[in-house]
Image (tube, rainbow, N blue to C red):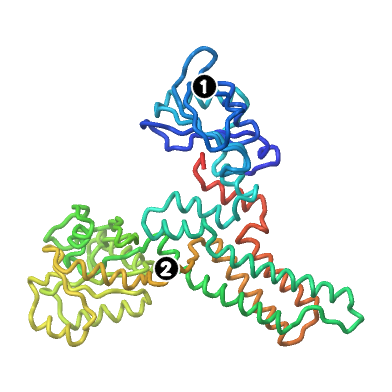
């Protein structure tokens, strides 16, 4: 999908509210003819004579036939989301009414908007930069407090303003070095190498901090894949049901009931955890169960967190030590969770408290100490940095550009320290500027824009 210059001159229309029957629906138009097109079918006030940011009651008619009573909201350029004339029509939520109104606007000269086209026009018209535009989609899809805050922070500027400020200073140095190249035969220096290195090192600190924030940002945006692993009958399914507060997984005294993995989400203090109840880890001759065990091991390797669950009434310390060693070799953070506290072997309980003091003791069946488990989960996620208001990177595209920026900045520092010629320093600066510009949208391609905005919903 691409957007040509001709496309951007059209007046576009789309349903801005979800498909389906509801109390109301909002139909949005944007473009130079938006007010004119609506005015042709709206019977109420003359919209062409009204002020921006006003709402008007009337009817939408197809010739003499009334389709619906509506409210029309006016946003006159440049005081609108797209910086074009925008009109929003609130109709009743009947699919029949929506389709009739849309067809009427198409007949009058509008065309259906492509996915993300309203937001793309806002970006192209300078309403905000590309990183902020992408945050609009993140805000729409935010399903937790933390993901909502991250998207809102980025939409309001996030790290864009700081990067743009530093980028402008780097552009200044680039132009000064380019000027030095014009005086190649003369011993002149328009750009202080000391000041350039100080600027690059400052930019490096900002970029490094953003790169390091991506792990947290990815958790905030996509949730934490958390595998519940352990022997059959350790209580994994019971724990999942207790956390979800519903009977999601089958609970049975028969070992090996869970043959495949069961996945569901829970929101803990604004963070989404994607819990995965897996087949029990044990040697088995059952072909189907063996496949489930193999899948469990694969899930554990790709998880962000593992809950290692074991039965306090049916496990010994040797077995626990062996499992803990295996988990440590995986390199994935894990929590040791001792289940069935009501059936605990007192000797094992004492040994665990001495040898594994970080073990959490719960009873999933009786829902005891589950709040302690949730607190431990939040401790491992570590949202303290985010909650202090620091910007976090949640977008893989931004992360990739930041990595490339860092590498280019290192090349600049290396060039200064080894006193390479100006043309090489200028080349490294240009590369850094290119990758920084990719984040905020100063550097774009049609393919990049098409890829980004095609993921938006139609009407946004």
Of tags 2 and 1, the one toward the viewer is 1
Residue in the image at 69% along x and 71% along y: 169
Answer left or right for 320 relative to 343. Answer: right
Residue extending farthest right: 185
Q: Is residue 409 above or below residue 295?
A: below
Residue drawn 76% across the image and 74% down it: 426
Image-quadrant location for residue 231: bottom left
Residue 74 coordinates in the image, percent (x, y) = 54, 34
Callout 2 secondary element = helix
Q: Which mark is residue 182?
A: none
Image quadrant where one finds the N terminus = top right
Q: Inspect this view and state whether residue 113 appears.
A: no
In three-dimensional space, the C-alpha distance between marks 2 and 1, rounded to whole angstroms, equals 49 Å
The tag earlier along the polypeptide, 2 or 1, is 1
Disc 2: which residue: 386
Residue 455 visible in the snapshot: yes
What residue lies at 59% left-to-right and 63% top-to-bottom?
Answer: 161
* 64 or 312: nearer the viewer: 64
What percent of the width, then of the height, locates residue 339?
16, 70
Q: Is residue 266 left or right of residue 83?
A: left
Question: In terms of image quadrants, where is residue 342?
Answer: bottom left
Task: Indicate the position of residue 170 as horizontal and vertical percent values.
Answer: 70, 71
Q: Residue 190: x and y, percent?
A: 81, 78
10 Å crowding of disc 1: few (<14), some (14-19), many (20+): some
Vertical position of residue 137 compared to residue 243: above or below: above
The residue at which mark 1 appears reads as 44
The answer to whether 234 appears left or right of 387 in the picture is: left
Q: Are marks 2 and 1 in contact (CB under 8 Å)?
A: no
Q: In this rendered view, identify the residue nearer to me: 365 or 34.
A: 34
Number of numbered markers: 2
């Amino acid at each position: 999908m691409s957007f040509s210059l001709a496309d951007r001159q059209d007046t576009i229309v789309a349903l801005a509210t979800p498909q389906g029957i509801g109390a109301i629906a909002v139909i949005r138009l944007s473009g130079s003819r938006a007010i004119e097109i609506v005015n042709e079918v709206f019977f109420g006030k003359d919209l062409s004579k009204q002020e921006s940011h006003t709402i008007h009651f009337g009817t939408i008619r197809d010739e003499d036939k009334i389709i619906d009573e509506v409210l029309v909201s006016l946003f006159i350029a440049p005081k609108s989301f797209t910086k074009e004339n925008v009109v929003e029509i609130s109709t009743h939520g009947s699919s029949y009414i929506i389709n009739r109104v849309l067809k009427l606007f198409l007949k009058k000269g509008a065309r259906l908007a492509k996915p993300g086209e309203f937001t793309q026009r806002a970006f192209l018209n300078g309403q905000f930069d590309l990183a902020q535009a992408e945050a609009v989609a993140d805000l729409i899809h935010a399903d937790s407090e933390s993901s909502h805050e991250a998207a809102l922070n980025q939409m309001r500027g996030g790290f864009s303003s700081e990067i743009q400020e530093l980028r402008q200073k780097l552009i200044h140095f680039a132009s000064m070095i380019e000027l030095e190249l014009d005086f190649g035969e003369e011993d002149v220096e328009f750009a202080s190498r000391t000041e350039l290195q100080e600027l690059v090192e400052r930019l490096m600190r900002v970029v490094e901090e953003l790169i390091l924030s991506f792990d947290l940002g990815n958790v905030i945006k996509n949730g934490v894949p958390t595998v519940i692993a352990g022997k059959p009958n350790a209580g994994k399914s019971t724990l999942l049901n207790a956390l979800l507060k519903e009977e999601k997984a089958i609970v049975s005294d028969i070992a090996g009931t869970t043959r495949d993995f069961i996945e569901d989400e829970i929101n803990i203090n604004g963070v989404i955890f994607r819990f995965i109840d897996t087949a029990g880890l044990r040697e088995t001759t059952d072909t189907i169960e063996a496949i489930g065990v193999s899948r469990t091991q694969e899930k554990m390797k790709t998880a962000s967190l593992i809950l290692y669950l074991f039965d306090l009434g049916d496990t010994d310390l040797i077995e626990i030590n062996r499992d803990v060693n295996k988990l440590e070799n995986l390199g994935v953070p894990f929590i040791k969770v001792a289940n069935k506290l009501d059936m605990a072997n007192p000797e094992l309980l004492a040994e665990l408290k001495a040898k594994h003091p970080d073990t959490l003791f719960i009873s999933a069946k009786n829902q005891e100490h589950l709040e302690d488990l949730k607190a431990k989960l939040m401790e491992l996620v570590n949202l303290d940095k985010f909650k202090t208001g620091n910007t976090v990177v949640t977008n893989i595209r931004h992360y990739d550009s930041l990595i490339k920026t860092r590498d280019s900045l290192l090349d600049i520092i290396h060039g200064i320290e080894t006193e390479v010629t100006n043309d090489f320093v200028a080349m490294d600066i240009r590369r850094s500027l290119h990758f920084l510009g990719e984040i905020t949208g100063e550097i774009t391609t049609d393919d990049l824009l098409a890829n980004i905005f095609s993921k938006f919903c139609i009407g946004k």
